[in-house]
Image (cartoon, helix red, strand yellow):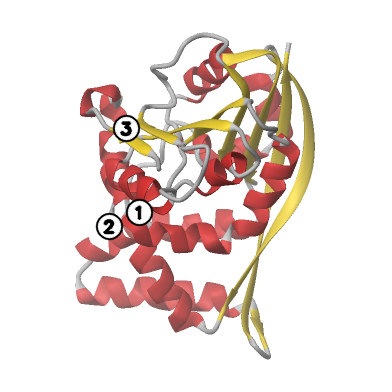
C-alpha cells in the first residue's frame, strides 16, 4: 500500500503550467518509463539503496525509481509536481512493500527536513526544474552527510537534444530559463552540485525499441504529457508537419525489426560533503 498527498500551494507559480503539461499523460506515462527502464536500473544500481535506508525520489513521475528503491527494502518518499502522475504512481505501487509515501512537492522548495535522507535519486526529473540552482541547493539540504545522490540527465547533444529541438520548433514557445539538458554536461553539474557533493560521472545510453514510426508516435502522444499537450493545440496542417518531422527523426533508428532508438545520458553520482 502507498500513500499520496497533494497540495497545489506547494508548487511554485512558474511550475504550474509544467505540472499540467506533464500530468496529461497520466498513467500512460508509465509506458515512457518502461522504455527508459535500462537507464532507470542503471541509476538504481548506482544509488545502491539498502534495507532501512531513507530514500527520496525527486520528480518521481509514475514512481518507477521509487519502486526500484523500495524493492530493496528502503523507506521511500517520492515527490512530483503533477497530481495526475502521483495518483498513477500510488496506484502502480500499491503492491510494493515497504510502502512508498507519495507527496506533491516542488524540487525548488521541498517540504522536507534538513539532512533527512540517506540517498536521493532523480531520473530525468529534477533536470526540468526552472530554478536549477535552487533545486540543487534543495537536494543538498535534505541529504545527510555522506549520503548518496544519483541523477540521470540527458546530454546537451545527441538524440534527446534533437528530439526536444523538433518539439520546440513546432511549439513556438520561448525556451526555459536554463536548458534541462545542461545537467548532462559534467562541468555544469559540477557548478550546480560540486560545492556540496563529491561528484563522479558515468555515461550511459538508453536503448528503446518500437515497431515503427507510427507505433512510437502513438506511444508518445498518449503518455508523454508535453507532446500530448502540443498535439492537442495544433491545427491539422501543423500536426501533420510535426508528425512528419518526428517520423523522419525516428527513421534514422530503423533496423530490420523496427526501431532501435539510442539516447545518450549522463549518470551523476554525488557523495554529500
Foreground residue among 95 and 12: 95
Foreground residue among 4 and 271: 4
Left or right: 128 as drawn, with respect to 44: left
Measure how far apart labels 3 and 2 are at the Cα level: 15 Å
Measure how far apart labels 1 and 2 are at the Cα level: 5 Å
Q: Are marks 1 and 2 in contact (CB under 8 Å)?
A: yes
Looking at the rendering, which quadrant does residue 198 occupy? top right
The residue under the point 34% across, 67% down is: 222
Foreground residue among 245 and 77: 77
Secondary structure, mark 3, is helix
- Residue 42, how many percent across, how many down? 71, 48
**223 to 86, vertically: above or below:** below
Measure how far apart labels 1 and 3 are at the Cα level: 13 Å
Label 2 crowd (10 A; few <14 / some 14-19 / many >=20)? some
Instruction: Name the disc covering residue 15, or none.
Output: 3
Label 1 sits on residue: 226
Label 2 sits on residue: 229
Sequence order check, earlier mark of 3 and 2: 3
Secondary structure, mark 1, is helix
The residue under the point 28% across, 47% down is: 84
Left or right: 158 as drawn, with respect to 96: right
Label 3 crowd (10 A; few <14 / some 14-19 / many >=20)? some
Q: Are marks 1 and 3 in contact (CB under 8 Å)?
A: no
Instruction: Name the disc covering residue 139, or none.
Output: none
- Residue 59, how many percent across, how many down? 46, 37
Looking at the rendering, which quadrant does residue 148 occupy? top right
- Do we see residue 179 in this rendering? no
Amino acid at each position: 500500500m502507498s500513500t499520496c498527498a497533494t497540495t497545489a500551494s506547494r508548487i511554485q507559480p512558474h511550475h504550474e503550467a509544467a505540472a499540467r503539461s506533464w500530468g496529461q499523460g497520466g498513467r500512460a506515462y508509465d509506458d515512457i518509463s518502461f522504455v527508459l527502464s535500462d537507464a532507470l536500473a542503471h541509476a538504481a544500481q548506482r544509488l545502491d539503496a539498502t534495507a532501512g535506508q531513507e530514500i527520496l525520489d525527486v520528480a518521481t513521475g509514475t514512481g518507477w525509481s521509487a519502486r526500484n528503491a523500495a524493492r530493496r527494502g528502503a523507506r521511500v518518499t517520492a515527490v512530483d509536481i503533477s497530481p495526475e502522475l502521483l495518483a498513477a504512481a500510488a496506484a502502480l505501487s500499491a503492491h510494493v512493500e515497504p510502502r512508498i509515501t507519495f507527496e506533491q512537492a516542488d524540487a525548488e522548495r521541498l517540504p522536507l527536513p534538513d539532512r533527512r535522507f540517506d540517498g536521493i535519486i532523480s531520473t530525468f526529473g529534477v533536470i526540468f526544474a526552472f530554478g536549477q540552482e535552487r533545486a540543487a541547493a534543495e537536494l543538498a539540504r535534505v541529504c545527510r552527510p555522506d549520503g548518496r545522490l544519483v541523477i540521470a540527465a540527458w546530454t546537451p547533444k545527441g538524440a534527446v537534444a534533437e528530439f526536444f529541438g523538433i518539439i520546440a520548433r513546432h511549439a513556438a514557445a520561448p525556451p526555459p530559463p536554463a536548458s534541462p539538458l545542461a545537467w548532462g554536461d559534467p562541468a555544469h553539474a559540477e557548478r550546480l552540485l560540486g560545492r556540496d557533493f563529491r561528484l563522479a560521472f558515468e555515461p550511459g545510453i538508453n536503448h528503446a525499441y518500437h515497431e515503427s514510426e507510427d507505433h512510437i508516435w502513438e506511444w508518445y502522444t498518449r503518455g508523454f504529457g508535453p507532446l500530448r499537450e502540443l498535439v492537442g493545440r495544433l491545427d491539422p496542417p501543423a500536426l501533420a508537419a510535426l508528425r512528419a518531422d518526428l517520423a523522419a527523426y525516428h527513421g534514422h533508428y530503423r533496423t530490420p525489426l523496427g526501431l532501435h532508438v539510442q539516447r545518450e545520458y549522463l549518470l551523476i553520482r554525488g557523495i554529500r560533503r
